[in-house]
Image: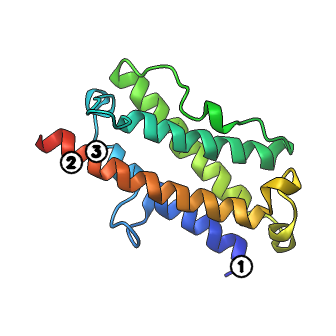
Amino acid sequence: MKKTEQLAHRLREVILNGTWIADTNYKDLLNNVDWKIATTKFQSLNTISALAQHIHYYINGIKNVFLNGKLEIRDKDSFDFPLITSQNGWETFLNRFWSDTEKLADLIGKMEEKKLNQTFVDERYGTYLRNIEGMIEHNYYHLAQIILIKKIILYN
């Protein structure tokens, strides 16, 4: 399997269908959460919804780099989202999250291997490989937070 295919597989694994690292993934974890739980605030922690939207923000932003070569996201905006106020709004977001993840995974899997070592938009961001691997690690970091927050909310 090519390195690009491995990276695409790892992205799908953490978001859509894997259980190897965390024994779950975003899709399995979040499809069983209703909008009220997803938006429940516990002390100073982020909500499940905010963390999921944060992860989607980066997935969608990196997807757009693959599609148009432009990095149009900023860290300072990565938690700035409209509130989810209904089950329909939550499900609409989740469907977009799954769809954008699959699109990005397809783009990663189909890219030429040599592009992995090329500059990602600007030299200060490093290579495509660094950004893809960093995004996957970032996904696991927040997945663990969501797991804990969900347990706190459900069993508190």
Amino acid at pointer 3: Ile
At mark 1, the secondary structure is loop
What is the C-alpha distance between the residues marked 2 and 3?
5 Å
Foreground residue, 145 or 62? 145
- Report which quarter residue 141 is drawn in: bottom left
Label 3 crowding class (10 Å Cα cut-off): few <14, some 14-19, many 20+?
Answer: many
133 lies left or right of 122: left
Kindly identify which residue carries mark 1.
Answer: 2
**Residues at badges 1 and 3 in contact (C-beta under 8 Å)?**
no
Instruction: Please identify, in this view, whether the residue under mark 1 or under mark 3 is nearer the observer.
Output: 3
Label 2 crowding class (10 Å Cα cut-off): few <14, some 14-19, many 20+?
Answer: few
- Report which quarter residue 41 is drawn in: top left
Where, quadrant-wise, is the N terminus in this rendering? bottom right
Query: Residue at point 87% right, 51% down?
Result: 122
Give the percent coordinates (x, y) of residue 90: 40, 29
Is any atom of residue 16 visible in this view?
no
Give the percent coordinates (x, y) of residue 139: 51, 55
Question: Which badge, 1 or 3, is on the more N-terminal residue?
Answer: 1
Give the percent coordinates (x, y) of residue 24: 35, 61
What is the C-alpha distance between the residues marked 2 and 1?
37 Å
Placement of 45 over or under 92, stated as above or below: below
At mark 2, the secondary structure is helix
What is the C-alpha distance between the residues marked 1 and 3?
36 Å
Query: Residue at point 62% right, 44% down?
Result: 58
Residue 149: mark: 3
Amino acid at pointer 2: Lys
Question: Which badge, 2 or 1, is on the more N-terminal residue?
Answer: 1
Kindly identify which residue carries mark 2.
Answer: 151
Instruction: Give the total of numbered labels.
Output: 3
**Residues at badges 2 and 3 in contact (C-beta under 8 Å)?**
yes
Is any atom of residue 141 visible in this view?
yes
